Every structure is written in structure tokens, then in C-alpha cells.
């Protein structure tokens, strides 16, 4: 446990401590000395003090606060790395978006690699991965300023996966709620269209949007028709057991260009274990239905309970053989709201890292490039999620969202609208209530607040 006189940043220091939890628990005292242009962080473990001086210069208040937090976290990381004799792949980084930090450093100094490796202690491999992502994003990133993405959230699924911590509801028993949600969502879509400026992409996510009935899916997409100007249009179909020829025909009729067909794994025993009502064969069936009309993304997860690294590698090879335009490799993230929160029988951190490294190598060999990445708390091995794409098939919405470089007009329960200024230097957010019933009861208030937010 950490004791610190820099209490404002205690949660951030605890995040660094949490990176080392599998190696043991020790008591740490952290002291901060403010010398104006130079600061000193001292970390005391078992009576031994480790002091780190950092020059921050004469900075504005916001930048100064950011640097103080950065070097405080780094001091704790360096100390624990020394005490345990362990160097972590992402070093002292605990944030969701490593690439966003890299872009900030590029703007300030022209390059980020030395900063990542020598200041933040990021490994050469993860620094190279970040560089690959930035290179893949180049054209999309450079055209983002002043644009908007339109997001619609459908919080229903055919069944609830054991690792899921989202607010999505099982469609079984949720019929009445779905019938109330769809007209409310359509109303919000219609009243939000005026907030969209320079549309870049549309994304209908969930949950599983195609878990809606054919009629309700058509109604929601019809509301979006008035916004769509022929841009990239993604529907997160996701679950193969909910993908039918009729559903795909509806998507195509409304100009959808991109969907997901997500195996997570091709191992049928694992699929049962994690609560998914489909088989590996169902994934192939759904992909074959969709591949001629849509650009397809497929998700895999490394570290699923009771899976070996060989099972993950086999699933990856089967996915590559299908030849989708996008493949996203996730590392299992077990959050408190999921049913897997108490399960500890997944792959070890080292095995997960080997799976992720294998995926990167094989996907590069197969013509895919990493084009976006993000990290979450509670991820196996403190690793990352990476989206891979064939050249020219990168998803605009994913890049805009991860790098926070375009406005987001978002509709639905748990949807977060954003106003972005100076390519992510300043971001304002408006979040709708997470709970579906609360969303329905407060829709008038939500619409009024969105009007004020986008102004």
C-alpha cells in the first residue's frame, strides 16, 4: 500500500502499484518535493530511499500538473521495478491510449521513441508497435480536424458473455424494454442530426445491434438514413447466432459498409464456458454470408478461461484463413461487473504475452498492420488490445475514438458525446445515463442537455 503526501495523485500511484500485484505486496512511502523548475520524488521501501530528480522548467499550471503526476508515477514504477527485478512491457504507462501520449510528444519534440523508452521505460517492442499504429493512422488522422462521428448504442445481446461488464441486457425477457427503447432512440437520433458537422463515420454498437427484431433494426437504421452521406458505416453485428440473411439484407439496404463477425475463439468448449450460444462453425457460416457485401472485422481474445496458447493460436490461424479485412486481438479483461471476476484459471501473464506477440507476427506476415490500440485496467499481463487491418481498410471510427480527434454525437443509454478541440488537447464530454430505464425516464432532460452541450 502507498502512503504519499501527493494525495491528489494517489489513485494514479495506486494504478502503478497494481501493475506489480502478482509479484507481491509491500508498503511504500512516497514524498514529493517541489523546487519550482525542478521536482524530486522520493520513494521509501523497507527503510531504503530512492530519490528521482526531474527538471520540468517554467510551465503553465495545467502542463505542470501533468508533469508532476507523470514523474510521481514514474518514480514508483522505477522503484518497484528495481525491488522486484521486473521490467514491464508498457513501463510506467497506465493510461488507455499510449498513442495519444505519443502524438503529444511528437507535437512537442518531433519524435516519441526516446521519450517512451528512456523516460517512461516502455519496451522497444511496444514502442515499435506504437510507431506502427501511428504510421497506419496517418491519412485518417491528418483529415480529422473539424469532423464528427455519429454513434448509436444498442444495449441488448442474444446472451450475456461471462467476461462482459457492459450494461447490455439479454434479449430473453427484455422484449418490453426493447419495444420502449427503440422509439426513444429513434427520437434522439432525429433530434441529434443537427449536431453533426462534417460527418466522417457512423457506428452502431452494443451489445449486439442485430439482436433487435428485423422490424426494429430497420426502424433504427431508417432514422440514420437522413444523416448518412455515404461515409464509412459500421454495425457491430458481433454474434454469429444473431446474424441472418434477412438481417444482412437490411444492413445493406441502409448503406452499411462494415460489420463485425466475432468468434472470440473457435473452440466450442470455450464458447460454452464463456456463455456464447454459437459454435465455431456458426462463425464461418455468418462470415460466408457477409463477406461479399461488407468489409468484415473479426475479434479474438487471448487469455480466455481454460484455453491454452495452442488453442488461441489455432483460432488465430482459422481467422487468418477466412481473410477478413480487419482482425482485432483483445487480451482478456476481467472487470468487477463480469461473472468471470472470480475466475483465475486463465493463461499466465507470460503466456498471454506470447499469444499477443505471436498474433502480431502472424498478422504482419499475412498482410495486416496494427492501426489502433488501447489498454484497460485488469487486463491479463497488463497488455493491450490491437486492431489490425489490411492496407486501406482501417476503420475511421476506431481511430477517431481512440485518439479523440473528432467530435462524437452519441445516442442511446450509456452513450458519451464529445466535443474535441485542438486535436484532443481539450475534450468536453456529455454522458447519457447507463441504465436503460433511467435513460427512458430522462430522455427529455437528455435532449435538452445535448442541445446545451453542442450549442
Image: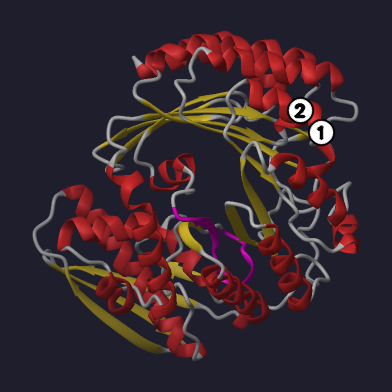
Give the magenta part as a residue range: 377-391
Element class at badge 1: loop
Q: Residue furthest left?
A: 58
Residue at 79%, 20% in the rendered image:
214
> Where is residue 344 shown, x and y percent of the image?
78, 70
> Where is residue 382 shown, x and y percent of the image?
56, 69
Q: Could one spot residue 303 in this view of the protein? A: no
Residue at 49%, 20% in the rendered image:
228
When asked about the image quadrant of residue 224, the answer is top right
| Disc 2 to disc 1: CB gap under 8 Å | yes
Say above or below: 35 vs 201. Answer: below
When asked about the image quadrant of residue 100, the answer is bottom left
Which is nearer the eye, 366 or 398? 366
On screen, residue 220 versus residue 170, left or right, reads: left
Which is nearer the eye, 180 or 292? 292
Residue at 76%, 28% in the rendered image:
247
Label for residue 247?
2
Residue where numbered disc 1 is placed:
244
> Where is residue 121 shown, x and y percent of the image?
36, 78
When asked about the image quadrant of residue 8, the answer is bottom left
Crowd class of label 1 (few under 14; some 14 to 19; many from 20; radius 10 Å): some
Amino acid at each position: 500500500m502507498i502512503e504519499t503526501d501527493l494525495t491528489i495523485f494517489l489513485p494514479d500511484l495506486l494504478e502503478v502499484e497494481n501493475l506489480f500485484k502478482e509479484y507481491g505486496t509491500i508498503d511504500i512511502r512516497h514524498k514529493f518535493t517541489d523546487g519550482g523548475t525542478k521536482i524530486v520524488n522520493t520513494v521509501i521501501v523497507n527503510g531504503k530511499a530512492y530519490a528521482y530528480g526531474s527538471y520540468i522548467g517554467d510551465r503553465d499550471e495545467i502542463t505542470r500538473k501533468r508533469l508532476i503526476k507523470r514523474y510521481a508515477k514514474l518514480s514508483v514504477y522505477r522503484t518497484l521495478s528495481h525491488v522486484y527485478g521486473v521490467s514491464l512491457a508498457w513501463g510506467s504507462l497506465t493510461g488507455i491510449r499510449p498513442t495519444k501520449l505519443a502524438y503529444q510528444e511528437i507535437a512537442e519534440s518531433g519524435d516519441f521513441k526516446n521519450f517512451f523508452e528512456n523516460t517512461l521505460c516502455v519496451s522497444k517492442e511496444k514502442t515499435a508497435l506504437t510507431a506502427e499504429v501511428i504510421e497506419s493512422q496517418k491519412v485518417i488522422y491528418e483529415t480529422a480536424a473539424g469532423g464528427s462521428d455519429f454513434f448509436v448504442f444498442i444495449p441488448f445481446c442474444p446472451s450475456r458473455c461471462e467476461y462482459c461488464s457492459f450494461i447490455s441486457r439479454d434479449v430473453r425477457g427484455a422484449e418490453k424494454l426493447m419495444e420502449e427503447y427503440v422509439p426513444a432512440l429513434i427520437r434522439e437520433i432525429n433530434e441529434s442530426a443537427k449536431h453533426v458537422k462534417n460527418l466522417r463515420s457512423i457506428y452502431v454498437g452494443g451489445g449486439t445491434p442485430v439482436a433487435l427484431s428485423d422490424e426494429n433494426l430497420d426502424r433504427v437504421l431508417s432514422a440514420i438514413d437522413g444523416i448518412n452521406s455515404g461515409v464509412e458505416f459500421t454495425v457491430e453485428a458481433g454474434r454469429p447466432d444473431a446474424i441472418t440473411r434477412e438481417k444482412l439484407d437490411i444492413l445493406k439496404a441502409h448503406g452499411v459498409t462494415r460489420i463485425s463477425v466475432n468468434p472470440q475463439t473457435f473452440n466450442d468448449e470455450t464458447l460454452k464456458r464463456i456463455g456464447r450460444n454459437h459454435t465455431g462453425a456458426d462463425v464461418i457460416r455468418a462470415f460466408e454470408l457477409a463477406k461479399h457485401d461488407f468489409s468484415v472485422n473479426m475479434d479474438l481474445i487471448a487469455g480466455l478461461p481454460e484455453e491454452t496458447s495452442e488453442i488461441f493460436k489455432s483460432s488465430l490461424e482459422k481467422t487468418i484463413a477466412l481473410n477478413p479485412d480487419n482482425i482485432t486481438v483483445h487480451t482478456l479483461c476481467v472487470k468487477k461487473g463480469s461473472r468471470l471476476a472470480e475466475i483465475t484459471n486463465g493463461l499466465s501473464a507470460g503466456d498471454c504475452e506470447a499469444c499477443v506477440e505471436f498474433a502480431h507476427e502472424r498478422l504482419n506476415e499475412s498482410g495486416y498492420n496494427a492501426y489502433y490500440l488501447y489498454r484497460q485496467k485488469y487486463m491479463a499481463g497488463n497488455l493491450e488490445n490491437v486492431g489490425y487491418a489490411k492496407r486501406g481498410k482501417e476503420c475511421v471510427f476506431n481511430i477517431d475514438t481512440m485518439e479523440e480527434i473528432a467530435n462524437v454525437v452519441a445516442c442511446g443509454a450509456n452513450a458519451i458525446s464529445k466535443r474535441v478541440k485542438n486535436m484532443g488537447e481539450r475534450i468536453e464530454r456529455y454522458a447519457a445515463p447507463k441504465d436503460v430505464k433511467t435513460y427512458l425516464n430522462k430522455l427529455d432532460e437528455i435532449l435538452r442537455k445535448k442541445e446545451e452541450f453542442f450549442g
